[in-house]
Image (spheres, grey):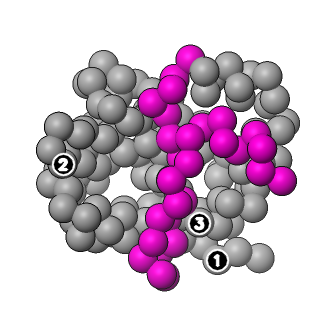
Amino acid sequence: MPSIVTSEATEKALRELLANEGYVLSEIRAYGETGTDILARKGGEKICIEVIGYKKSPPARAKDFFESFFRAISRIKDGPGNCVIALPSQFRVGLPARAKQYGEAWTRIGNAFPELEIWLIDTQARSRTLTRWNDWLSKD
């Protein structure tokens, strides 16, 4: 069974990665504060990032994923180049099945929101894998 990873651990690892890549980052939000989890800027690039953890319960993971989706696309009004859902790398196993389950709906979401990305964050190796929303339809 994949290990549980908190959203705080995921955010900390991602902030370190982005800072090392030269991004200027927004301050860490206070508990309960609304808004983008991480706003990353470099040059003219602006990325709005929503971060979630990996919980033990599959229904809780699904709920967090879909909430982060709506939060991510709501950031389009802020004019980012990319709206990102950042997830612990443990999500890699279930995402292809989730994309396949929703099929045409998943594709339409990706087509409607071309700036939507899913990043997998390896909190141990301090690395990230960047994917577009619709990339998950071809992964099995």
* Residue 98 seen in the figure: no
**Residue position marked by numbered label 3 in the rendering:** 89
Q: In the image, which is nearer the foreground, mark 1 or mark 3?
A: 3
**Residue position marked by numbered label 1 in the rendering:** 3
Number of numbered tags placed on the structure image: 3
Residue positioned 51% across, 72% down in the render: 122
**In the depicted structure, whether residue 74 falls above or below residue 26:** above
Going from N to C along the chain, the mark reached first, 1 or 3, is: 1
**Residue position marked by numbered label 2 in the rendering:** 42
Q: What range of the chain is rendered magenta?
A: 112-140
Identify the element where label 3 is drawn: helix
Across and down, in percent, residue 128 comes to 47, 64
Going from N to C along the chain, the mark reached first, 2 or 1, is: 1
**In the depicted structure, whether residue 128 falls above or below residue 73:** below
Going from N to C along the chain, the mark reached first, 3 or 2, is: 2
Identify the element where label 1 is drawn: loop
Across and down, in percent, residue 138 comes to 78, 44
Across and down, in percent, residue 63 comes to 63, 42
Q: In the image, which is nearer the foreground, mark 3 or mark 2?
A: 2
Residue positioned 27% across, 24% down in the render: 79
Across and down, in percent, residue 40 comes to 24, 48
Report how far apart the C-alphas of labels 1 and 3 lie in the structure. 10 Å
- Mark 1 Cα-neighbour bin, 10 Å: few <14, some 14–19, many ≥20: few
Going by the numbered disc 1, the residue's amino acid type is Ser
Instruction: Tell me where residue 107 sits by quadrant.
Output: top right
